[in-house]
């Protein structure tokens, strides 16, 4: 196709690097000058052996060609003649800018698309190509295909943008007239744009929906048996009886107002099991159902996929409304945006215009919808801090922007919505009780709710937050704070401003004293400062006496501050024109907040109340400190806050039970109190696993490694991982129970792993990379990664855990829980086990759950510490892990064992898929036979292997199988011939006879 560009007088530039490092191996450029097109392309000698990706090999780049090419300096010299002084359009500007010392202007494609289409949620190149180029497919590799795809995408994007905006520039973008893209997009010829759109855009016909089968909604879970509902519009569906049965319990819980507890394993279709009865119930009874989850991933999955799909299938799209609501600070605020000072520098101005377009023109006000790439590129954190919804200032009812505000619309939607998705933390606060009372609740990922409950009922004073809090009240030097503002309006001499000011100053001084006394205590006690320091605030420890003394002083200063503030508030309340000022309301709330801080200080200093853990935490750089009190028993508080008012409640998770069933959850979350109040509790016995854990996975415990000796451990672990890389395929996750061990391993092993071409990654945004087969990744993660990593298929089959994730008994909160059990008459080890076991067993189940996500998955978990077979706790843990064999052997034996198992797992998958696809494979072969008669066995082989390869890809599996039909049937998996016994050979031969 002839290259065409709506942009003129620019160069589109592509710089390709080798597979595993940043060595440049090819530079391509397309020049559009006076609407004439010319091209530049050159391979670059990397001066070393490099690894080429499949993509590069497909484009015909070989090491031999690279070796005979010019080096980078020579190529850049030629390129610079080609590019002249023209602007360079490229995708990843930062990397490219570094290569050039000339002053060509760089035009960043991501920046352009973010301003034209602020609503885009991803700025990954493949996503953008698919989004803008109709019918885009990744094939026909040529040396210029990348650049030409980009040119085509830009053509479509700019044309689409102008078409959407009536062929003119929106006002907001005219604010960016000094932006380097501005002159280029305003120079675009509208006739070209129209012509391009008219000639090229392919409109996809909407597929007509099939008519609905007849079914009665009141049948609830029986609808799972009604296959026509789920197979409508060509979807695939297989009945899962366990899902149907689980759904029955959930429906009964809703209808009869019970508290139901259920462990539903991965693969059961848990969300559909509760969404189906919830949707029908809310429709038939017109009662709202709140679904609470712990992770954003699950919340998005529910509202973007599961709920709409379910309502579509049940023909309830118009009847059941749903919404997702998050905490206020997750939304952009119109009111606050108006107060932002107009930016003077270009980078901030681009971000400002981006936010303005997002909010005002696209009607999007959810901060999480902004792609992380754009957050970083436009440095949006700074602007968002100034315009996210302020929970104290926002009063939807009284807000003058409520008709245009996204958050206000969310609150309005709550009134109508029948299914409401929230997170656990919001559920525990539930500020919308007046609009939506807590009546019917589904708590998914319920195993996380216990920790959330402790967090929600924790009372803490964090130094930097507290200082900010005080300054928000009155900050005379900076002429800010609610009292400052109100005093300006009030113009009253009787306001005790100097008293407030001096009390605040005194409090801030006291905080500096507390910080110094923490520092002294830590230094004198010889406590390591490698990580944050966390310990009990022990009032009987003489070394802590100065900390306690300064906390007492702070409490006294707060009392004085409170008296002055109350005086100020009472003066302000008497001024009639301030009575409606929302700042006065906030100030009054702030005074109440000071009271709660005083109460916390009182509790910490006296520690007279039993059943609390009082602790401190100090930042390792001594920048901040925190004091805290956590109730050791949150059952009463949770009951009062949540359960006391609910009609029905479901607690569901894939990991909820421990050796004592649901006891731990019941006791912690006040379910026993609900029972004593005659609430009916249903404990559904844990549902059996859907996947064949025993047949498709294995756990190895490494006997001779000691994770407690961190240095030696890191070295051992590095050697082990390097060896392991030769024995397993795909990407690997390494999880650490301790930050120290993670850091030590990172330091010890990263370089050696990188030298082997392995990409070592750490961030949550890197999790997606584990699905890749183009490069090999190792993800290092701490406890936060024990759940939420969902990699179906065999791109990732190996998880390593540094040790059994027992609790740290020195951690103040766990220590208090253990002591509490000892006080109740248990010996130390019994007490430790009682606290530890529910946590360790759920953590371990979660880690193990990373491996098997679908029925085709297989995998191995390595625990790098002795998993002692005689220890009773370990025995109990084994039974929690679906009785999968835990193998303790030496390293070589383990690798031998693993290789045999992997070969078997792959064989099981092959037979399973062959069975599943037999009718469609037969059909595909028949179609080919109709086109070409007298096909040879070789041709049959090709069709079969190609077909199977596609089927493997659909299941996220790598097709490393070769099926040969000549002479006799032979199958190779991963290059090794499958040894078939006579019976199996006969069966397989018959299979292919049937096919061809
Ligand atoms: S309702 Fe008003 S104050 Fe609240 S977020 Fe919206 S614009 Fe801001």
Image (spheres, rainbow, N blue to C red):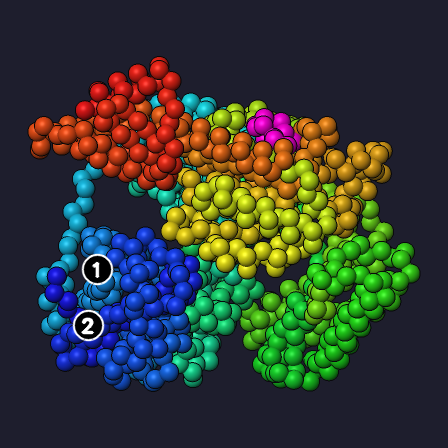
x and y percentages locating residue 888 in the rendered image:
64, 32
The image's mark for residue 142 is 1
Report helix, strand or loop for mark 2: strand
Q: For this view, does 726 lie left or right of residue 467?
A: left
Residue at 26%, 54% (x, y): give it. 58
Q: Would residue 908 be found to the left or right of residue 150 on screen?
A: right
Q: Quadrant location of the N terminus?
A: bottom left
Q: x, y (%) of residue 446?
A: 57, 39
The answer to which image quadrant residue 337 occupies is bottom left
887 inside magenta stretch: yes
Q: Is residue 502 visible?
A: yes
Give the mark, 1 or 2, whose residue is nearer the N terminus: 2
Element class at badge 1: loop
For residue 595, above or below residue 83: above
Region rendered in magenta: 877-888
Picture layout, residue 642 above or below residue 68 = above
What distance separates the C-alpha of mark 1 from that of mark 2? 13 Å
Q: Residue at x 35, y 38 (%)?
A: 960
Task: Give the residue number, with chain letter if any, for mark 2.
Answer: 39
At 65% across and 79% down in the image, what residue appears?
A: 475
215 sits to left or right of 550: left
Is 643 inside the magenta-drawn segment?
A: no
Q: Is residue 138 above or below residue 910?
A: below
Say left or right for 475 vs 527: left
If the image is split into quadrants, where does the C terminus sit? top left
């Amino acid at each position: 196709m002839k290259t065409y560009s709506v942009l003129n007088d620019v160069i589109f530039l592509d710089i390709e690097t080798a597979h595993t490092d940043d060595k440049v191996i090819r530079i391509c450029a397309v020049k559009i000058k006076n609407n004439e097109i010319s091209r530049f392309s050159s391979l670059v000698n990397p001066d070393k052996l490099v690894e080429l990706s499949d993509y590069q090999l497909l484009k015909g780049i070989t090491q031999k060609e690279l070796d005979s090419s010019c080096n980078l300096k020579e190529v850049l010299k030629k390129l610079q003649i080609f590019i002249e002084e023209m602007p360079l359009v490229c995708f990843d500007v930062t990397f490219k800018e570094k290569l050039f010392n000339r002053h060509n202007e760089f035009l960043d494609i991501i920046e352009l698309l973010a301003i034209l289409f602020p609503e885009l949620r991803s700025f990954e190149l493949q996503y953008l190509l698919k989004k803008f180029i109709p019918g885009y497919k990744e094939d026909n590799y040529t040396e210029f295909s990348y650049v030409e795809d980009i040119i085509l995408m830009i053509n479509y994007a700019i044309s689409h943008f102008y078409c959407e905006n009536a062929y003119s520039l929106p006002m907001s973008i005219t604010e960016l007239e000094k932006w380097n893209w501005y002159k280029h997009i305003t120079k675009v010829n509208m006739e070209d744009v129209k012509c391009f759109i008219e000639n090229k855009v392919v409109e996809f016909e909407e597929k007509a929906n099939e008519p609905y089968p007849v079914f009665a909604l009141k049948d609830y879970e029986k609808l799972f048996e009604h296959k026509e509902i789920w197979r409508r519009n060509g979807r695939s569906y297989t009945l899962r009886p366990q899902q149907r049965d689980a759904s029955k319990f959930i429906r009964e819980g809703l209808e009869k107002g019970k508290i139901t507890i259920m462990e539903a394993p991965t693969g059961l279709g848990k969300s559909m099991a509760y969404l189906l009865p919830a949707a029908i119930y809310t429709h038939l009874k017109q009662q709202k159902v709140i679904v609470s989850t712990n992770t954003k991933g699950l919340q998005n999955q529910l509202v973007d996929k599961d709920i709409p799909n379910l309502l579509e299938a049940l023909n309830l799209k118009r009847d059941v409304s749903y919404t997702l609501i998050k905490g206020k600070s997750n939304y952009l605020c119109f009111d606050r945006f108006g107060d932002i000072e107009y930016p003077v520098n270009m980078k901030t101005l681009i971000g400002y215009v981006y936010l303005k377009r997002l909010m005002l023109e696209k009607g999007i006000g959810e901060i999480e919808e902004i792609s992380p790439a754009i957050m970083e590129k436009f440095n949006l954190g700074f602007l968002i801090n100034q315009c996210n919804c302020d929970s104290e200032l926002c009063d939807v009812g009284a807000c003058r922007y409520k008709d245009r505000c996204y958050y206000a619309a969310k609150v309005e939607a709550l009134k109508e919505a029948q299914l409401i998705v929230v997170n656990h933390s919001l559920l525990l606060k539930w500020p919308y009780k007046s609009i939506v009372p807590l009546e019917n609740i589904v708590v998914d990922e319920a195993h996380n709710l216990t920790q959330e409950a402790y967090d929600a009922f924790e009372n803490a004073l964090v130094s930097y937050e507290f200082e900010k809090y005080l300054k928000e009240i009155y900050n005379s030097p900076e002429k800010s704070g609610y009292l400052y503002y109100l005093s300006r309006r009030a113009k009253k001499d009787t306001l005790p401003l100097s008293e407030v000011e001096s009390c605040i100053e005194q409090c801030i001084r006291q905080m500096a004293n507390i910080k110094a006394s923490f520092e002294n205590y830590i230094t004198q006690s010889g406590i390591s400062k490698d990580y944050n320091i966390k310990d009990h605030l022990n009032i009987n420890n003489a070394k802590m006496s100065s900390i306690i003394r300064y906390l007492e002083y702070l409490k006294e200063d707060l009392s004085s501050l409170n008296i002055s503030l109350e005086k100020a508030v009472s003066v302000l309340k008497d001024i009639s024109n301030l009575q409606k000022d929302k700042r006065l309301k906030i100030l009054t709330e702030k005074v109440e907040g000071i009271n709660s801080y005083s109460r916390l200080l009182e509790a910490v200093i006296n520690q007279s109340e039993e059943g609390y853990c009082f602790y401190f935490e100090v930042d390792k750089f001594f920048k901040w400190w925190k004091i805290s009190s956590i109730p050791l028993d949150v059952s009463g508080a949770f009951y009062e806050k949540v359960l006391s008012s609910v009609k029905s409640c479901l607690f569901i998770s894939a990991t909820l039970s421990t050796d004592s069933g649901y006891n731990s959850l019941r006791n912690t979350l006040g379910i026993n109190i609900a029972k004593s109040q005659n609430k009916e509790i249903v404990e559904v016995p844990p549902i059996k696993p859907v996947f064949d854990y025993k047949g498709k996975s294995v756990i190895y415990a490494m006997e001779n490694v000691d994770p407690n000796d961190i240095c030696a451990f890191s070295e051992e672990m590095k050697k082990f991982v390097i060896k392991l890389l030769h024995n397993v395929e795909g990407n690997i996750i390494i999880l650490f129970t301790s930050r120290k061990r993670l850091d030590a391993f990172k330091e010890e092993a990263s370089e050696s792993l990188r030298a082997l071409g392995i990409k070592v990654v750490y961030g949550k945004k890197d999790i997606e990379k584990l699905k890749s087969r183009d490069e090999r990744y190792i993800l290092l993660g701490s406890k936060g990664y024990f759940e939420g990593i969902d990699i179906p298929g065999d791109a990732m089959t190996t998880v390593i855990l540094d040790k059994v994730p027992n609790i740290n008994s020195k951690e103040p909160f766990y220590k208090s829980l253990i002591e509490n059990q000892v006080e109740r008459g248990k010996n130390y080890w019994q007490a430790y086990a009682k606290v530890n076991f529910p946590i360790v067993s759920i953590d371990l189940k979660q880690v193990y759950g990373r491996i098997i996500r679908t029925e085709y998955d297989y995998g191995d978990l390595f625990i790098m510490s002795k998993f002692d077979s005689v220890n009773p706790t370990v025995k109990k843990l084994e039974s929690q892990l679906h009785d999968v064999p835990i193998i303790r052997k030496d390293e070589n034996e383990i690798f031998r064992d693993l290789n045999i198992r992997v070969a078997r797992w792959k064989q099981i998958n092959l037979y399973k898929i062959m069975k599943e696809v037999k009718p469609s494979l037969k059909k595909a072969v028949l179609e080919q036979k109709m086109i070409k008669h007298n096909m040879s066995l070789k041709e049959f082989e090709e069709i079969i292997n190609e077909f199977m390869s596609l089927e493997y890809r659909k299941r996220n599996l790598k097709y490393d199988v070769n099926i040969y039909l000549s002479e006799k049937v032979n199958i190779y998996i991963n290059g090794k011939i499958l040894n078939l016994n006579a019976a199996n050979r006969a069966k397989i031969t018959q299979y292919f006879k049937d096919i061809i």
